[in-house]
């Protein structure tokens, strides 16, 4: 999608078109709907609206009810953090007393949304002009404050009060990469950030010996999937290694409270001794402890 097309989609006629597509999709066939709408709207705008409606349906698994008001691209949606995971990370950052954050490579703004909702002032940096425009529009769509600029993340000055958040791209010309050597921005730059007030989201298969000294590595599991490793810069580190199992609607409840975090350090992740269940919270149900233990076992296999 071109930037000019997205800007048209945000206009009053574009919003009317989006609403009509949402009303008629599934009632009319794609062919008849597209043919009818192209009599009133430009073909590229119709294609963009139909695509957005489709992506909003797919995005509900990551963004919940908010997806119906947000904007996406195919690639950016695939790369976006699940909102449950982003919200967990944002809440933890807010609990440290952080009040301002800069997302260096914010994509379409999923993490900006989570940070803003956690009460943190946000600034996004995105080199791709379409994604930058989408991130800004997504903040506005949810009535959240924040600034998004189109720039190279490595060239932007980080404010003294800002925590740097970075989610380096994990794809190269051959597809998804599992090597820190292929990350963009470069891994060496990310490591330098993590010496200070910074948080980085990286691949869940990150090797233990790749974690910089003094940095906390938090592996996060959601819905039974090991989804990311979150690296907490030296000022935020509270342990060396941690496994976090996010609660679901039907499990991971202990004494009425979610069971979310279990320390599993220091490195390497320790084997669970008999009679020494992973510390999933006092009073956790046996099934919940088993789920947490399975997550830790998967982490040990990385």
Image (spheres, rainbow, N blue to C red):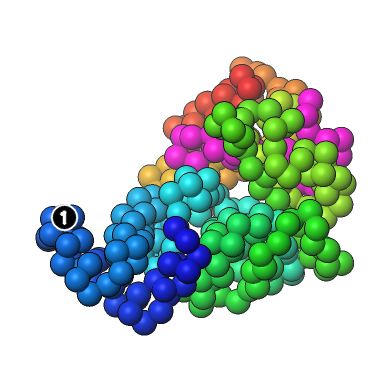
Q: Could you tell me which quadrant the C terminus lies in?
A: top right
At 75% from the left and 23% from the top, the residue drawn is: 268
Q: Is residue 285 visible?
A: no
Which quadrant: the N terminus?
A: bottom left
The x and y percentages for residue 33 are 17, 62
Picture coordinates of residue 90, whole percent (x, y): 63, 58
- Using a 10 Å C-alpha cutoff, classify the residue at mark 1 as few (fewer than 14 neighbours), some (14 to 19) or many (20 or more): few
Asked if residue 216 lies in the magenta stretch, the reply is yes
Residue under the point 51% across and 71% down: 137
Q: Where is residue 238 in the image (x, y as percent from the top left)?
A: 79, 45
Is residue 105 located in the magenta-colored stretch of the structure? no
Name which residue lies at 38% across and 50% down: 61
Q: Residue furthest bottom?
A: 12
Q: Which residue is drawn at 58% across and 23% down?
A: 297
Front one among 108 and 224: 108
From the image, tell me which residue sits under label 1: 31
Count numbered badges in the picture.
Answer: 1
Q: Is residue 221 above or below residue 121?
A: above
Q: In this view, does 191 lie to the left or right of 25?
A: right
| SS at badge 1 | helix
The segment highlighted magenta reads 209-238
Comparing 227 with 291, the one in front is 227
Residue 224 showing in the rendered view:
yes
Image vertical order of residue 263 relative to residue 250, above or below = above
Left or right: where 300 falls relative to 154: left
Which quadrant holds residue 98?
A: bottom right
């Amino acid at each position: 999608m071109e930037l000019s097309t997205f800007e048209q989609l945000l206009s009053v006629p574009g919003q009317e078109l989006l609403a009509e597509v949402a009303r008629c999709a599934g009632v009319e066939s794609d062919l008849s709907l597209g043919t009818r709408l192209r009599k009133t709207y430009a073909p590229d705008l119709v294609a963009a609206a139909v695509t957005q409606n489709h992506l909003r349906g797919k995005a509900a698994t990551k963004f919940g009810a908010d997806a119906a008001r947000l904007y996406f691209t195919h690639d950016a949606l695939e790369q976006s953090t699940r909102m449950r995971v982003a919200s967990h990370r944002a809440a933890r950052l807010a609990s440290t007393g952080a009040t301002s954050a800069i997302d260096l490579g914010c994509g379409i703004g999923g993490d900006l949304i989570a940070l803003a909702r956690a009460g943190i002032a946000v600034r996004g940096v995105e080199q791709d002009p379409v994604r930058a425009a989408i991130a800004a529009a997504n903040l506005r769509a949810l009535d959240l404050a924040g600034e998004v600029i189109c720039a190279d993340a490595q060239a932007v000055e980080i404010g003294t009060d800002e925590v740097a958040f970075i989610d380096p791209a994990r794809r190269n010309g051959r597809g998804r990469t599992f090597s820190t050597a292929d990350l963009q921005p470069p891994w060496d730059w990310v490591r330098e950030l993590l010496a200070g007030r910074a948080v980085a989201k990286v691949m869940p298969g990150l090797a233990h010996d790749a974690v910089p000294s003094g940095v906390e590595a938090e592996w996060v599991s959601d819905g039974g999937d090991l989804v990311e490793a979150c690296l907490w810069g030296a000022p935020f580190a509270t342990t060396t290694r941690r496994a976090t199992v996010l609660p679901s609607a039907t499990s991971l409840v202990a004494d009425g409270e979610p069971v979310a975090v279990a320390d599993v350090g220091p490195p390497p992740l320790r084997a669970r001794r008999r009679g020494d269940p992973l510390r999933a919270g006092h009073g956790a149900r046996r099934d919940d402890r088993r789920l947490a233990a399975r997550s830790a076992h998967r982490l040990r296999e990385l």
